[in-house]
Amino acid sequence: MTDDEIAALSPAERRDLILRLVPRPDGLPSERTINRIRKWRTVLILLGSLALIPWTVYLAVTLPNHYVARHWVATWVGFDVLLLATLLWTAIAGWKRRVMVFPTAVVSGVLLLCDAWFDVLTSQRSDLMQAVLSAVLLEVPLALILIGGPLKLMRYLAVRYGVVDSHTHFWSLPIPVPDLYPNRQVPTRGPQP
């Protein structure tokens, strides 16, 4: 096929072509197994979320407003070492163009948001302005880049390899296992050809 013929294919036709050109990988679980795992993981996440509601209410009612913490230095230094490790891992994975950049970047971003949150909320009045400026100017913007970048790249790859139409919104992206659902319609958003 020529490049023009490939460009003229619909997303569904491109997916079909990809499926014919790329063999099903060895070790890929059956559709039934994947659906069972997805169902049980979803149930566990929902149960954990439900259990967190009364626990959060309990903490809000019972925790003291002032508390002297033991191991304060070890807590913060340990957290910063963990943050440093995930940032370095992200940098190396990004430099080498490895798939590991997706989870490490998101973890790094979430840790930066946690760092900003706890720095601002635990700072003394004399340090509050520095904590807020650090959060607003450094930690939160970097976290958004670290989380948003991999998400945009995942969407780009899904569009590029014909898993979804280019008008598909990120929140509508399916998990790209197209050979399990060969007859399923691809979610799209916007005008249809």
Image: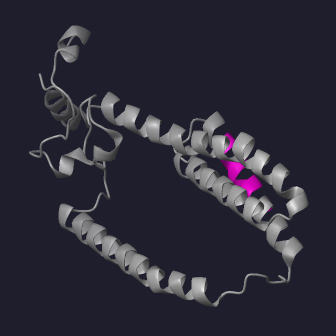
Q: Nearer the viewer, residue 172 or 140?
A: 140
Q: Is residue 40 left or right of residue 102?
A: left
Q: Is residue 125 left or right of residue 88?
A: right
Determine which quarter of the picture holds residue 115: bottom right
Q: Nearer the viewer, residue 138 or 120?
A: 120
Query: Looking at the image, which residue is at 20% across and 47% down?
Result: 179
- In the rendering, at what x and y percent does residue 20 appear? 18, 35
Q: Would you say the magenta stretch is mainly helix, strand or loop?
A: helix
- In the rendering, at what x and y percent does residue 66 appear? 79, 82
Query: Looking at the image, which residue is at 76% across and 53% down?
Result: 84
Question: In the rendered view of the protein, which quadrant contains the C terminus?
Answer: top left
Query: Looking at the image, which residue is at 24% across and 71% down?
Result: 36
Q: Nearer the viewer, residue 43 or 63?
A: 63
Total labels: the figure holds 0
Is residue 88 rendered magenta in the image? yes
Is residue 171 rendered magenta in the image? no
Magenta extent: 81-91
- In the rendering, at what x and y percent does residue 54 appear? 46, 86
